Image: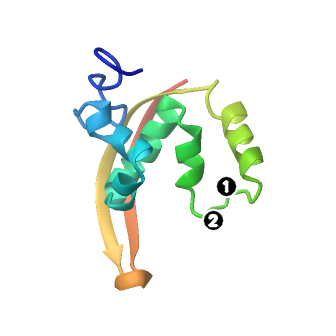
Amino acid sequence: ASGFGGAAVEDCPCGSGLGYMSCCGSIHKNANDYASATPEQVVRARYSAYAKREVDFIVGSTHPLNKNFRADIEQMKEDIRTNCYDNFELNKCEILSQEFEGEGEEQIAKVKFIATMTQ
């Protein structure tokens, strides 16, 4: 939704307490915001993408080495649309920790989180 009363004022599904467009929505919609996001923000944004059914962001933010990544992007999108939304609702994303290993291009970030959902 857009305009007054829409996404601009709705709470972000990640549970940050911020409005959706001030939090994960800007990462979903703006490539520069995504590129400069911290690992924690990316985890929150992916969580929110599942909650908001932002399939393009889910696919675009899935690392090619992830076991769920598919070279056939359209099939991957269809699999997500078919399998991910009928059985649960996401309620909150609680970040437990964020750690970094390595340096520069070799740096790896690890984010521990709890995803709260209901079936």
Q: Locate the C terminus and report the quarter of the image it occupies.
A: top right
Which residue in the structure is indicated by mark 2? 64
- What residue is rendered at 43% in x and 37% in y? 48
Residue 13: which quarter of the image? top left
Q: Is residue 47 left or right of residue 40?
A: right
Classify 24 as above or below 63: above
Q: Nearer the viewer, residue 65 or 3?
A: 3
Q: Nearer the viewer, residue 111 or 40?
A: 40
Residue 23: which quarter of the image? top left
Classify 101 as above or below 7: below
- What residue is rendered at 48% in x and 31% in y? 51
Q: Amino acid at mark 1?
A: Asn
Residue 16: which quarter of the image? top left
Residue 66 x/y as whole percent: 62, 62
Classify 55 as above or below 70: above
CA neighbours of label 2 inside 10 A, class few (<14), some (14 to 19), many (20+):
few
Circle 1: element type: loop
The answer to whether any part of residue 79 appears in the image is yes
